Image: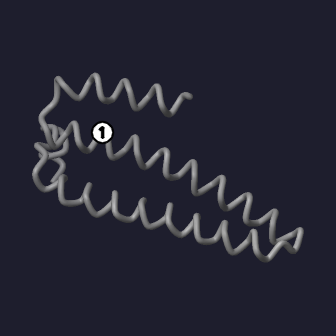
Amino acid sequence: MGLVEEGQQIIAEGEKKEDAAADLALIGAAQRVEHYEISAYTTAKNLAQQLRHSAVVALLSKSLAEEENSDQLLNQVSRSLMSVARMPTALEQAE
């Protein structure tokens, strides 16, 4: 529930931001969900391995790979948006 509420808050706050910055915030929220799912699938897969349930391990491995792929795609999109988004002055001066 916390991740959903956080996502809803980011959506509401996004109306006040530039498009790229709002999109980056949404991507961050989506990645937090992906990381939560990756953690859950990893734990479940490890348990299934310990219990020697190879069919379950195979299904969980597939789901885990899908979540990791989603996370990688979100990373690619966010890198593209970073070149478009206006960075805060403090970051520009650091470069």
Total of numbered circles in the picture? 1
Q: For this view, does 7 lie left or right of residue 64? A: left
In the image, residue 48 sits, relative to residue 7, either above or below, namely below
Q: For this view, does 94 lie left or right of residue 56? A: left
Which residue is nearer to you in this view: 18 or 55? Answer: 55
- Quarter of the image for the C terminus: give it: bottom left
Q: At 18% from the left edge and 49% from the top edge, which residue is drawn?
A: 94
Q: For this view, does 34 lie left or right of residue 86? A: right
Q: At 73% from the left edge and 65% from the top edge, which residue is drawn?
A: 45
In the image, residue 13 sits, relative to residue 46, either above or below, namely above
Please provide percent x and percent y for residue 61.
63, 71
Crowdedness near tag 1: few (<14), some (14–19) or many (≥20) residues, C-alpha within 10 Å: some
Q: Amino acid at mark 1?
A: Ala
Q: At 75% from the left edge and 69% from the top edge, which residue is drawn?
A: 56
Q: At 33% from the left edge and 29% from the top edge, which residue is drawn?
A: 10
Q: Secondary structure at mark 1?
A: helix
In this figure, which residue is indicated by the disc labeled 1? Answer: 25
Query: Could you say which quadrant of the image residue 13 lies in?
Result: top left
Please provide percent x and percent y for residue 78.
26, 55
Query: Could you say which quadrant of the image residue 51 lies in?
Result: bottom right
